[in-house]
Image (cartoon, grey):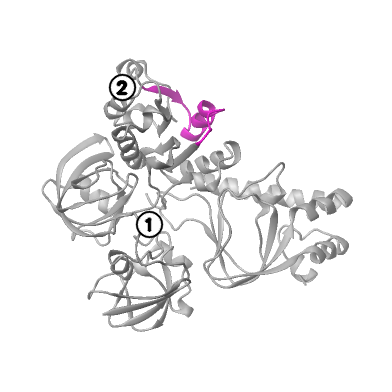
Amino acid sequence: MLSVENLVKTDLFQDLSDQALQAIAGFAVPATFEEGDNIYQLGDDANDLYYLESGRLRFSIGVGNRPDASGSLILPGKIFGWAALLHEHPRRVATASCLEDSDLYIISRQNLLELFSQDQAAGYQVMRRLATTIAGDFVSVLSV
Amino acid sequence: MKIHVQTKSGEFEYDCEQGENLLYAGLRQGLTLPYECATGTCGTCRARVQEGEIGLEWADAPGLSYVNHEKNELLMCRSTASGNCTLRVPAKVTDGAGDMAIPGYRKGKINNVRERTHDVVSFDVTLDSPMAFDAGQFAVLETEVVTGGRAYSMVNYATSTDTLDFVIKRKPEGKFSDWLFENNIDGHEIDVFGPLGKATFHPEEKKNLLCMAGGSGIAGMMSIIARGCEVSHFADHRGHVFFGVRTAEDVFYLDELSSFVDAYPETLEVTVALSDEDIPRDLENRYPRIKFHTGFVHSVTSEQMAGKYDNILAYVAGPPPMVDGALRMLVLEARLPGTDIRYDKFG
């Protein structure tokens, strides 16, 4: 089971109450992916968030004529795939692939949104953190 | 030397010459080893050395940021073997490229160098033997003057040809493009490896085409449109070409694009988007077949393509912000599936 101690260290869930964290840990489902597997690809429906327990992932958005290797690494302890929290039929605009055999927890969008509708304080805290993440991505895009 | 590869779809063995990079050796023998840029940037050709001695060609390759050195990982496109070796490749590999032409080495000679804009040149390369390629593919060009190869899309299309056309934009501190711009390269001999790339056009898919290009990303689109015209694809399919540059001084290939539209005025549209200035009136007058709009190319595409995404296959090429913006637009607004969006991971 995904530990609450690990979950509270993530950027997205760091402000949540123990009760909310335990709820998320309770519906997080473990999954194993092999090196070379894609967790998701550009254009896929975004139905889940993920917590990387062990392994190493590559996260790449569009690529092109860039001076550096495109994308970024996702290391253990990170939440990724937050497009699943966006409004109305969210889809992936990036690809997440395994650079090593990786253990993840899958956190369902539907379960999260149900939790947030019941615990609106938790929903507010997560959306506040999500806005910060999106703003950070926007700044990094502008600085390319 | 023998290179043994363990993959997700079985084990294979291929020959590799002294000093030859591990990726090209496998590709030229028909193995579908994983790659995107084939020049050390993207990191897709990552493999793990199980046995043998490997040399690294380019220690600062950007793609090495995805390599775990502690696990003896490497980029096949930037590595050479000094003896027999065994690699683990975390991908499905087949022996035989299907309908795609198997890439190979050729010698070429640069001809017809032409300055298209202040920072764009075009030239053709006459090969020592014909090459077959699909519209949208690229080749790696290498000269002994500059270390390492550079990937460029072919502009032309021919079923099999001994002439490849290229268009290249000067990059800040780009050693290869500096060499192109600062020297008289007409007649210079060059090494060519190709064809490469999977963002290809196949008329038998029977799709309407959306081509979004920024700057020299128009190269592969020219090949795709040429192929479409050759097989009369636009007689019964639509083609929408969006070409983004900063200013009117940066735009090129307008005569060629106008000729394409002349051939299929009812179904083929070309729109040029200028991001940094209003449209000069004389440009519109000189090129009445082409539409001009102000804005980023993905924004202009979004406005002009609303409601026209039926049976669309999209191609995207250009600088990173443009490609990112285009992909977001195609996924989130146009709601195209990922399988209907094609782009190569190189410049």
Q: CA distance from mark 1 to mark 2?
A: 34 Å
| Of residues B266 and A45, the one drawn nearer to the viewer in this rendering | B266
* Residue occupying the point 26% across, 53% down: B176
Which label sits on residue B262? Answer: 2
The chain that hosts pointer 1 is B
Outermost residue to the left: B187
Q: Residues within 10 Å of mark 1 (few under 14, many from 20)?
A: many
> For mark 2, does the 10 Å Cα neighbourhood hold few (<14), some (14 to 19), or many (20 or more) residues?
few
Q: Residue A2: say if magenta.
A: no
Task: Locate residue A111, reporting x and y percent.
Answer: 80, 55
Camera sees residue A67: yes
Q: Tell whether label 2 touches label 1 (CB within 8 Å).
A: no
Query: What kind of element bears circle 1?
Result: loop
Residue B236, position as x, y percentages in the image: 41, 28
Q: Which residue type does callout 1 highlight?
A: Cys
Quarter residue B129 falls in:
bottom left
The residue under the point 40% across, 53% down is A67
Q: Which residue is mark 1?
A: B37
Q: Nearer the viewer, residue B59 or B140?
A: B140
Locate residue A121, reporting x and y percent. Answer: 86, 51
Q: Quadrant of the N terminus of chain A?
A: bottom right
Q: How many marks?
A: 2
Disc 2 residue type (three-letter): Asp
Q: Earlier in the sequence, mark 1 or mark 2?
A: 1
Q: Is residue A122 left or right of residue A104?
A: right
What segment carries the magenta color? B290-311
